[in-house]
Image: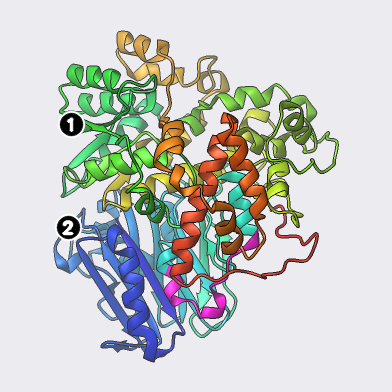
Amino acid sequence: MCGIGGFFGQDPGAAAGVAAAMLEALAARGPDARHARFFTVDGENSENSGAHALLHARLSIIDPRPLADQPMASSDGRYWLCYNGEVYGWEGEAADLARDEPFRSRSDSEYLLRGAAAWGVEALLPKLTGMFAFAFIDWQRRELVLARDRYGKKPLLWWSDGRSFAFSSLLRGLLPALPAAARRLSAAGLDAYLAHRYIPAPLTCVEGVQRLPAGHLLRWPLDGGEARVERWYAGAPAVADEPPPGDWKTALDQAIERRCVADRPVGLFLSGGIDSSVIATRLAALGHRFAAFTAAFPDTPFDETAQAASLCRRLGLQHHVVPVPTSIRDDFPAIVAALDDPFADPSAIPLWYLAQATSREVKVVLGGDGGDELLAGYKRYRKHLRNAWRGRLHWPGLPAATPRQSKAQRWREELANPWADAYQLRFSGMSLGQRRFLQPSLQAPAHYWAPPPVWPADPLLQLLAIDRANYLPEYILRKGDLTTMGHGLELRAPLLDHHFVHAVEALPAARRFTAQPKRLLAEVLPPDLAQTLFDDKKRGFNPPLRHWLQHDLADRYAGLGGRLAEHSAGRIDAAAVERMLELYRGGAEDLAENILQLLILDESLQQLQAGGLRCFNPHPEPGETVGVSP
């Protein structure tokens, strides 16, 4: 687990400084070792500087010896690898690769390097189980390949002008490699953030910088040219290119067991919910007694400490309770910085504190991400399915610009979109009316979500496919990666092992989608524990947002409209921001998450512009279109 980066076509005179700045931005992701490898345009190693470079900040989990550090080269120097992630169960295939040349390390990094060299990246990718984002160079073919895992557990961003290329795990790690003229705020990225509370792939808040989508790879010729992005994973194959899915219970235990392998201490994020409780129970059944870590919100209705503590006593697990601080004032800038570019999920704040405390005890932690998207656990699925009869039927029209959305306006905005497009309103940031209120010149799509690779016929499967392509990789998994890796902590997700996912997807719909969501998982729990878990009301990971806005963050309200107008070169209207603040302070509690969005945007843009980000067109034309629906 690491931070990676690189650049190609850089001015050699500036390369050392660029590399140092990029590695500094990646330092938290890789506290154990940092290395830069420079190359001439011909691919020859250069001591301290060169037109090309690969960069690596390492969190050493498997084989912590320096000989497993990266960037890693083949013995003949033809192939190079820069890799972030963890893959499992590779040792058998590594034995085949080692017949001609023994492995120098015990690391999965060497397996990826040797496998890509022997079979090619496209043949290697389907063999990989786990999470990964990597860059692979073949100097003989003069080609760079980037690849990202099936579900988007690991981030990867890139930029190219055709002559030069740069990539990084973080936007802030990429900015130093960009020419000053390329560090421009993206109008589409800004509006996408307002619409979704995050910026969906391939967009970022920097114009021209793209996120490589989950399950995709990118090829770029080292002599310059167009970057070609293509999908390598679209879901379980119609004709299996792997053994047919076995029993899902066996697949679950195997997924958990694989993620227990580490040369560093391993723990578990445990709430009082179903997914993490299932993982804890199966861990204990498999003989693992890892320490569990629970975020506590004392004296609140959403505190799950008692439920988690009860399960730990039953399973014999050491339990660490991590109280989320009452005040976040002093840590707010650091939390925003860890989230890289603007990202406004309130639950990211307690997760950041949980990761901070957990990282002091262990370096690897298992979590329950993925269960809701696999087994239709979110309430919004059932709510939106009530209107599935609409299909493509809709009543076009722009909503009125408004600082606050009434129920009637929300219903009108939903009806303005086909049924599948309207699903984004079930989990959105600002409504289109609010976005138009804040950006008077706005003409933009209703949403910036990418379409799934395949549209299933079944309406529920359509919603799951939308989330799999957007919400899961770019919201849930990005949040988990950034908050944990910001403290040098590796987060593993057993419920997103693709063998387990495929086994569950192969089940009849009646077993997979139950009246009480996720009831399938009760089959791997003792009956009394299953009854307790499924009878308890789901609390969610909800922080005390109202308290934070009224106390810790309230001193940021003064001048907020003016600052956002300045950061956005006038695209965001200062008076509109102040009107929203006035309404919220006057009792409009429904605006709370919108106000948090604006506060995070303010802090994030201040930080990014201090790092060299520039505003876009300072004088947008009336009615200017800032983005198109994917």
Q: Where is residue 444 drawn, in percent x and y?
A: 73, 53
* The N terminus: image quadrant: bottom left
* Picture coordinates of residue 133, whole percent (x, y): 40, 59
Left or right placement of residue 503 versus residue 625 in this view: left
Disc 2 packing (10 Å; few <14; some 14–19; many ≥20): some
Residue 109: horizontal and vertical position, in percent? 28, 62
Q: Characterize the local packing of mark 1: few (<14), some (14-19) or many (20 or more) Cα atoms within 10 angstroms.
A: some
Relative height, residue 610 to residue 164 (above, below)? above
Quarter of the view holding residue 497: top left
Asked whether, in this view, residue 463 is left or right of residue 101, the answer is: right
Task: Find the magenta span and give its range.
Answer: 174-187
The answer to whether residue 244 of the structure is visible from this angle is no
Q: Earlier in the sequence, mark 1 or mark 2?
A: 2
Front residue of 492/102: it is 492
Question: Does 180 sit left or right of 23 as displayed?
Answer: right
| Residue ID for mark 2 | 63
Is label 2 in a helix, a strand or a loop?
loop
Q: Amino acid at mark 1?
A: His
What is the spatial separation of the Cα atoms under label 1 and label 2, in whole angstroms? 21 Å
Q: Amino acid at mark 2?
A: Asp
Q: Which residue is mark 1?
A: 288
What SS does tag 1 mark? Answer: loop
